[in-house]
Every structure is written in structure tokens, then in C-alpha cells.
């Protein structure tokens, strides 16, 4: 019929947007349910994601009727701490050095504890990261490490069907500046060594400083991973089979590094971990002596990791190619190593000086030596 008025029908997309009865969002990503309990009282409850709200509403409706949720609709609430435990097992199994990330996981577990993992929202994760960064005075790198672990926990939870969504997805990471290059000047190194020698509590640790300056090893590689079984004193090569990026690194030993190794060798039986104190006990970190020694030497803005920059910077200043530096540092590519490129500017001057212009190309005008001022002859 021509005069028939068309009836408006909702599209599937519009129907999908409609929220089920008793379920509503209070903020982006935060859903609540409203229901009547068995005593006829109205109740409101925070549920987290929309999916969790639907499940919780269905459960509360059955409970109000004195029934149990049917087995096929029943979904166990997985505590966030269980996701953290699964992540810790994964890290111990897959990571070369799991200690730091396991420590970060302990921080993360305290944020949400035994709360249902599905109830945690993106806004809550973002707020927890921001609060922890402010209270702990974290660097951008530290915040991003925790961000990565949180995301890993939820990804593993999705893989094992314990959660449906990853609330960390979409949260922006902190911008990092990895271009920092801080190295000791000759005068600073002299002052640092004098400070170490001046203290009875510090002087036994000077070989650790020498080994770090002459090998460029990361702290964990030098203190934990470097063992005598991988040190060839005759060939003057020290090896770490698995570094931070998963690859081995082989370091030709400088004369100062050899002297330091001989001191450590005298403190043990030539087996196991290399770096030891005067009593022959393996050492795990240098913070207890290095930080106060740097302060006593009056050196500002200098950390243990900067000794690695010293090693690379001094190599570059002697003209060592970036590819060789990358290999010695254990970098997989040149992206991280290019931060040292500007330190060999004298070599670049020599390279530019070798440019020869074609004979038929006009050169820049010569200044007229007899006339003062900026006067040129063509």
C-alpha cells in the first residue's frame, strides 16, 4: 500500500548498544549493577567491565530467587593475585634474569590484592601506575616496566581463559629518554679512586670499579652471571653466555681488567662467581659502597650503569667503530650504540677533510686579504 507508514525498526548495531536491564556504566569502563535482593531491597554493586557486570547481575538475580546459577552460566571469579602467580611462574621459566621483574610483580600484587581480575578497570590501572610513580619517584623506565608486567599478567590470563579483557591495553606508556650519556672524566675517576682508597670499608672494592670500567658489563652480568668457568685468563677473554637481551657477549680483557680478575682469583678457589669481597664471599651488588664513594668524591649525577657508558665512550674516543662497540656491549643493533657517535668528532673532521671536489666545480670565493671587512673576489 502506497500510503502505509513505515515502521521504524532498530538495526542490529543499535540493539547491541542497548544495555541489559539492571546494568549501567557510571564512568568510562566502569559498570555497576542494580537489582532487588531476596528481602526486596534495592542493591547497587560495582562490577568492573560490562561482561563482568552481566555475569554478576545474572548471579544476583538467581540468588534473590533462592537458586544457584546454573553450572553452564557459572563463571569463577579469578583473583588478580592468581594472575600474578601465573605470571611469576612464566617469568621464572622464560626470563634470563627474573629477579627484578618478580620484585615488581610483588608491587603490582599489592595494588589490587585478591580483587577479582575481571573487575579491574583501565582507569584503576592508570591511577595505580600514576600514584606509584609519584610516591616512589620512579623514572619513566620503572613505570613502563610495571606497565609491561601488568599487561603480561592479563595477556596470560586471557590465554588461559581466566579473564576476557586486558584493561592495560590502550594505556599509554611513559616517554623515555635513552640518549643519556654520562661518563667519568679523568679527574673524576682519579677523585673516585682516591675516595675509595681513603675508606677502610671501601678500599677492597676498587677491583670492582676497575672491572666495570674496563669491560662495560652490566651490573647483573658482572656480579651474578660472570663465573670463572667462562673466563679464559690465558686467552684474556671473559664471556657471559646469556645477557639481558638473551645473547652471549665476549669481552677481550684490558690489562686493568686482568689485574682486577687476579685479585678476585686470590679471594676464592677459581670456581663459581668471580666478584667476591676480601672474605671470599660472592657479592650481589655495589650500592652499599659505590653510592657513598661517589658522594664523597663530589661527583654529581653519576650511577653505576654510567660505568658502562664510560667503557663505550672511551672506546669511541679512540676511534673504535660503532659496530665493534655494539658487539662489546652486547647490543643487537646500532640504535642504542649511536648515542656514542658524536664522541669521535675528531675522526669525522678527518673524514670530511678527505673530500675532493671535481676540478670543474667552482669553489667558494676567496677573501681579499688586502681589503679589511667581508670583501670577496669572484
Image (tube, helix red, strand yellow):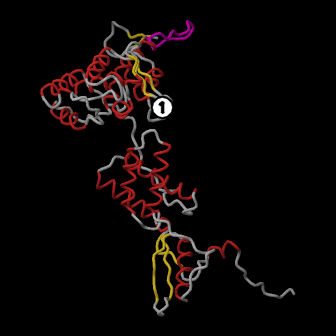
Residue 180 within the segment the image draws in magenta: no
- Between 180 and 37, the one lying in front of the other is 37
- Write the residue at 47% across / 68% down: 119
Residue named by callout 1: 335
Residue 217 position within the rendered picture, expressed as x and y whole percent measured from the top left:
37, 28
Q: Is residue 204 above or below residue 21?
A: above
- Write the residue at 39% across / 56% down: 108
Q: Quadrant of residue 295?
A: top left
Q: Is residue 274 above or below residue 166?
A: above
Q: Is residue 108 above or below residue 370?
A: below
- Between 109 and 147, the one lying in front of the other is 109
Q: Element type at marker 1?
A: loop
Q: Quadrant of residue 50?
A: bottom right
Residue 101 position within the rendered picture, expressed as x and y whole percent measured from the top left:
41, 47
- Write the residue at 30% across / 36% down: 284
Question: Magenta stretch?
Answer: 352-365
Amino acid at each position: 500500500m502506497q500510503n502505509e507508514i513505515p515502521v521504524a525498526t532498530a538495526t542490529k548495531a543499535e540493539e547491541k548498544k542497548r544495555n541489559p536491564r539492571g546494568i549501567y556504566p557510571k564512568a568510562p569502563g566502569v559498570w555497576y549493577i542494580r537489582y532487588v535482593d531476596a528481602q526486596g531491597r534495592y542493591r547497587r554493586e560495582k562490577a568492573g567491565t560490562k561482561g563482568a557486570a552481566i555475569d554478576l547481575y545474572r548471579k544476583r538475580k538467581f540468588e534473590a530467587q533462592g537458586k544457584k546459577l546454573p553450572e553452564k552460566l557459572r563463571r569463577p571469579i579469578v583473583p588478580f593475585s592468581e594472575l600474578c602467580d601465573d605470571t611469576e611462574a612464566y617469568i621464572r621459566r622464560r626470563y634470563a634474569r627474573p629477579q627484578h621483574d618478580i620484585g615488581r610483580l610483588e608491587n603490582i600484587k599489592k595494588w589490587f590484592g585478591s580483587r577479582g581480575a575481571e573487575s579491574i578497570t583501565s582507569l584503576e590501572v592508570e591511577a595505580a601506575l600514576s600514584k606509584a610513580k609519584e610516591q616512589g619517584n620512579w623514572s619513566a623506565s620503572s613505570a613502563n616496566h610495571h606497565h609491561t608486567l601488568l599487561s603480561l599478567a592479563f595477556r596470560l590470563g586471557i590465554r588461559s581463559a581466566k579473564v576476557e579483557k586486558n584493561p592495560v591495553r590502550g594505556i599509554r606508556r611513559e616517554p623515555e629518554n635513552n640518549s643519556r650519556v654520562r661518563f667519568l672524566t679523568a679527574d673524576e675517576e682519579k677523585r673516585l679512586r682516591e675516595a675509595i682508597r681513603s675508606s677502610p670499608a671501601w678500599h677492597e672494592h676498587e677491583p670492582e670499579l676497575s672491572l666495570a670500567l674496563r669491560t662495560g658489563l652490566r651490573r647483573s652480568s658482572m656480579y651474578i652471571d660472570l663465573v670463572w668457568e667462562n673466563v679464559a685468563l690465558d686467552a684474556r677473554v671473559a664471556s657471559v653466555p646469556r645477557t639481558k637481551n638473551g645473547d652471549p657477549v665476549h669481552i677481550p680483557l684490558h690489562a686493568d681488567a686482568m689485574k682486577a680478575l687476579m685479585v678476585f682469583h686470590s679471594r676464592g678457589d677459581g670456581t663459581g662467581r668471580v666478584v667476591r669481597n676480601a672474605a671470599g664471599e660472592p657479592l650481589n651488588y655495589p650500592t652499599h659502597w659505590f653510592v657513598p664513594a661517589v658522594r664523597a668524591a663530589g661527583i654529581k649525577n653519576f650511577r653505576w650503569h654510567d660505568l658502562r657508558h664510560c667503557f663505550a665512550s672511551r672506546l669511541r674516543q679512540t676511534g673504535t667503530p660503532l659496530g665493534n662497540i655494539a658487539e662489546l656491549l652486547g647490543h643487537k643493533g646500532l640504535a642504542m650504540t649511536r648515542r656514542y657517535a658524536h664522541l669521535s668528532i675528531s675522526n669525522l673532521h678527518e673524514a670530511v677533510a678527505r673530500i675532493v671536489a671535481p676540478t670543474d666545480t667552482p669553489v667558494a670565493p676567496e677573501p681579499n686579504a688586502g681589503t679589511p671587512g667581508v670583501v670577496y673576489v669572484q
